Image (spheres, rainbow, N blue to C red):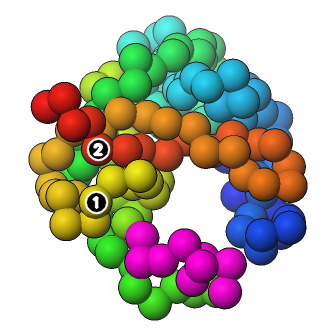
Amino acid sequence: MNTASTAHADGRPIPAPDADSRPYWEAANRGEFRFQRCTACGQPQFYARALCRHCHGRDLTWEKAAGGGTIVSFTQVSRAPSEAFARRGPYVIALIDLDEGVRFLCNVIDSPLEAVRIGARIRLVFETREGSGQKIPQATLDRGS
Ligand SMILES: [Zn+2]
């Protein structure tokens, strides 16, 4: 997945989709988290790649995550790397295991900082990045658990 990006109005980066990641970002704009699954070995993978990271198979399909997951690790950022992020701080960056078996990194938003813990259940939410309209998958604590 291409991590190249450009800055926009609020100073935070905007994703720059490439051939591998475009389906992911287009799905995010529909409010869906999509990940790849290899038809040869059956393994899920995230982020998007041209080949399966397990068996190097080339036949990858896209699946939609249901939206539930668990926090594996997290950190609270109190000293942001730039002014754009400082306006949002302090904030949480978390490593999330989605129920489908893929892991990704995101912010935990709209949640009390003191309630974020390893093992907490989350649900996916989609935050619209100002200036581009691109939606970014993020997590919020699942208060139903
Ligand atoms: Zn495979």
Q: Residue at x 59, y 13 (%)?
A: 61
Q: Which residues are magenta?
A: 83-91
10 Å crowding of disc 2: few (<14), some (14-19), many (20+): many
Q: Is residue 42 above or below residue 104?
A: above
- How many numbered badges does the structure rendering display? 2
- The residue pinned by badge 2 equals 141
Between 49 and 87, the one nearer to me in the picture? 87
Quarter where residue 136 is shown: top right
Between 72 and 39, the one nearer to me in the picture? 72
In the displayed structure image, the side of residue 85 where residue 76 appears, left or right: left
Q: Mark 1 or 2 closer to N-term? A: 1
Q: Is the C-beta separation of discs 1 and 2 under 8 Å?
A: yes
Q: Is residue 49 visible?
A: no
Q: Give how far across and how far down residue 63 sits, in percent.
A: 52, 14
Q: Residue at x 40, y 85 (%)?
A: 78
Q: Is residue 81 above or below residue 47?
A: below
Quarter where residue 107 is shown: bottom left
- The residue pinned by badge 1 equals 112
Q: Residue at x 78, y 70 (%)?
A: 10
Q: Residue at x 49, y 36 (%)?
A: 125
What secondary structure is marked by label 1? loop
